[in-house]
Image (cartoon, coloured by chain):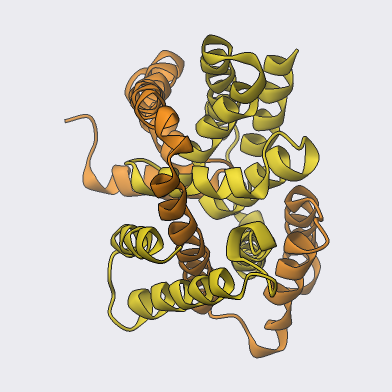
């Protein structure tokens, strides 16, 4: 049953994930954290860290790992492998379906402005989606609260440090995350 | 030599237009071009299977470490850094979209709706596609 829910959930994500990988990421978060409650925000952000660090597309990695983690905690290792396969199949199937559809249907010339304006609209909305993911992850467990001022202060510093490092110095994000990990070992 | 450079560029553009994950879409359209439906299925499987094996290895290595204090405090340092990375990604995408200033509020409203009020991104995307469709059909 869990397999089926995983498959259908990720099938939806893949099938309606207009707007590229970042939209997909937002949908994965909504599915595994908000809708089903399989993972906490804390667990999800840990998965994102791993997804960013290993090769491959972050959204795909996150989907596989969420499938795995979703059942790992209560059902054990081998079931979890099956679950991550189900999640991955669910995400990959729509690519196959859409490719088939795209090969059969040719969009008539007069629809060109429509596709263009859909893409323009999506390009405005998708940054908001990814910003929403960032915002939803700012929970007290993750960045600390006023009751734990040291944790909060270090978190804010590391967050700003990463932002400055990426924008002003063009450092690789994975490098900055690793550096923050070292800082975390020393400070938290 | 499966295809020319131009054709490859065309397939990349198509994969970017399609909903879902880009890497899987790209594998699917290239496989489709090379060997039809079978090619597309094989290409997707070949993209997915190495990833799954890699994750198996990762999980086997990392799950015992999860309970170490040092590992936990490393994660606690990494989490805010990842939030920073996401913020930069959002900002860069917003800037490259060259959004008209009168629509600058849209990404912020979307971020609050998704991040705080937990509105499903699916509805927002469908709404956006619908609005883009109507705009392109009647106003452009």
Residue A124, position as x, y percentages in the image: 63, 70
Specify whether residue A114 is in view: no
At a point 57% along the width and 41% down the height, the residue shown is: B20
Q: Residue A98 lies in what quarter of the image?
A: top right
Position of B50 compared to B134: left or right?
A: left
Q: Between residues A169 and B104, which one lies in front from this camera angle? A: A169
Q: Residue B136 lies in what quarter of the image?
A: bottom right
At a point 61% along the width and 75% down the height, the residue shown is: A149
Q: Between residues A30 and B97, which one lies in front from this camera angle? A: A30
Q: Which chain can be seen in orange?
A: B
Residue A154, position as x, y percentages in the image: 49, 73
At a point 68% along the width and 63% down the height, the residue shown is: A140
At a point 55% along the width and 35% down the height, the residue shown is: A63
Q: Residue A57 lies in what quarter of the image?
A: top left
Q: Spot the residue most to the left.
A: B1
Position of B118 compared to A54: left or right?
A: right
- On the rendered image, what quadrant is the N terminus of chain A found in? top right
Position of B43 compared to A11: left or right?
A: left
Above or below B12: residue B140: below
Residue B102, position as x, y percentages in the image: 71, 88
Q: Between residues B94 and A82, which one lies in front from this camera angle? A: A82
Above or below A188: residue A48: above
Specify whether residue B20 is in view: yes
Residue B113, position as x, y percentages in the image: 79, 65
Above or below B60: residue A118: below
Q: How many marks?
A: 0
Q: Colour of chain A?
A: yellow
């Amino acid at each position: 049953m869990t397999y089926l829910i995983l498959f259908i959930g990720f099938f939806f994500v893949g099938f309606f994930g207009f707007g590229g990988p970042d939209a997909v990421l937002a949908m994965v978060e909504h599915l595994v954290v908000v809708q089903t409650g399989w993972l906490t925000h804390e667990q999800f952000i840990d998965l994102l860290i791993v997804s960013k660090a290993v090769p491959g597309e972050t959204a795909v990695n996150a989907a596989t790992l969420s499938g795995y983690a979703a059942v790992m905690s209560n059902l054990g290792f081998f079931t979890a492998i099956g679950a991550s396969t189900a999640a991955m199949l669910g995400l990959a199937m729509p690519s196959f379906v859409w490719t088939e559809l795209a090969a059969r249907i040719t969009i008539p010339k007069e629809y060109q402005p429509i596709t263009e304006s859909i893409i323009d609209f999506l390009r405005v909305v998708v940054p908001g989606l990814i910003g929403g993911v960032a915002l939803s992850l700012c929970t007290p467990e993750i960045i600390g609260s006023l009751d734990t001022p040291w944790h909060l202060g270090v978190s804010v510093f590391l967050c700003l440090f990463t932002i400055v490092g990426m924008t002003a110095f063009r450092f690789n994000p994975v490098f900055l995350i690793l550096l923050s990990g070292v800082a975390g070992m020393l400070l938290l | 030599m499966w295809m020319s450079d131009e054709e490859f560029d065309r397939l990349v553009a198509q994969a970017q237009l399609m909903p879902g994950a880009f890497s899987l879409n790209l594998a699917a359209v290239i496989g489709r071009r090379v060997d039809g439906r079978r090619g597309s299925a094989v290409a997707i499987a070949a993209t997915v299977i190495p990833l799954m094996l890699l994750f198996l290895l990762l999980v086997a290595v990392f799950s015992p470490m999860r309970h170490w204090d040092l590992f936990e405090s490393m994660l606690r340092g990494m989490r805010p850094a990842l939030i920073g990375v996401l913020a930069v990604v959002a900002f860069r995408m917003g800037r490259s979209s060259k959004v008209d200033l009168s629509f600058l509020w849209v990404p912020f409203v979307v971020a609050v709706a998704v991040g705080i009020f937990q509105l499903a991104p699916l509805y927002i995307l469908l709404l956006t596609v619908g609005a883009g469709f109507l705009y392109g059909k009647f106003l452009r």
